[in-house]
Amino acid sequence: MKLILPDNIERVVPSWFREQLRNLDPNLIVYFNPMRQRWVIDRCTRNGAMSAALHEHTPECPRTNVTVVEEEGQYMPLCQQVIDDLRARDAWSQYGSFEVYDRLTQNAADEDAAKRETAIDDLYRHTTADNRAQLAKAWTLFSRHDMSRIH
């Protein structure tokens, strides 16, 4: 069932939602986009993408999009589920800094490359052993039978 929203209604962010959003990250901004008919959450990047400095946000603040609040493509109100989703995807609190995140992703990439290299080496080793076994069987077969005579 699709929710029909009137166009002339003013959308107001609930104070409890604004407070929880500010506690999560002081640079998060929530507003209603009338073109998309959805709530949008952006992150202010005025002091840099990795900065969490508290300041008053203005429409001139440079920002990067964090999420468009919707559920399966349909309108979704500002609720606790949105806060929980943001908390679950909050890389800042999980990693603390870009350097830690970069180091962890590089370590994961190195581990993956090492696993792939090991798998390739194992495949070559197995294939070589299989080829040797087949050649040994063929040699045994040729040595047991006289191929110059018709039987």
Image: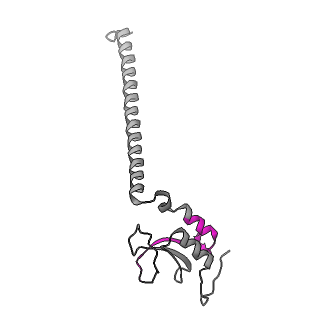
Residue 84 included in the magenta stretch of the image: yes
- The single residue placed furthest to the right in the displayed view is 1
Residue 90 included in the magenta stretch of the image: no
Q: Quadrant location of residue 23?
A: bottom right
Indicate the colouring scheme. Answer: one colour
**In the displayed structure, would residue 61 be above or below residue 117?**
below
Residue 59 in picture, x, y percent from top left: 45, 84
- The single residue placed furthest to the front in the displayed view is 54
Residue 73 left/right relative to 54:
right
Residue 148 left/right relative to 3:
left
Residue 139 in picture, x, y percent from top left: 35, 15
Residue 126 shows in the view: yes
Quadrant where the C terminus sits is top left
Along the line of sight, the residue nearer the viewer: 51 or 69: 51
Residue 37 in picture, x, y percent from top left: 56, 80
Residue 69 shows in the view: no
Quadrant where the N terminus sits is bottom right
For the point 51% across and 62% down, the residue is: 90
Along the line of sight, the residue nearer the viewer: 34 or 21: 21
For the point 45% across and 69% down, the residue is: 52
The region drawn magenta spans 60-86
Along the line of sight, the residue nearer the viewer: 119 or 52: 52
Residue 115 in picture, x, y percent from top left: 41, 40
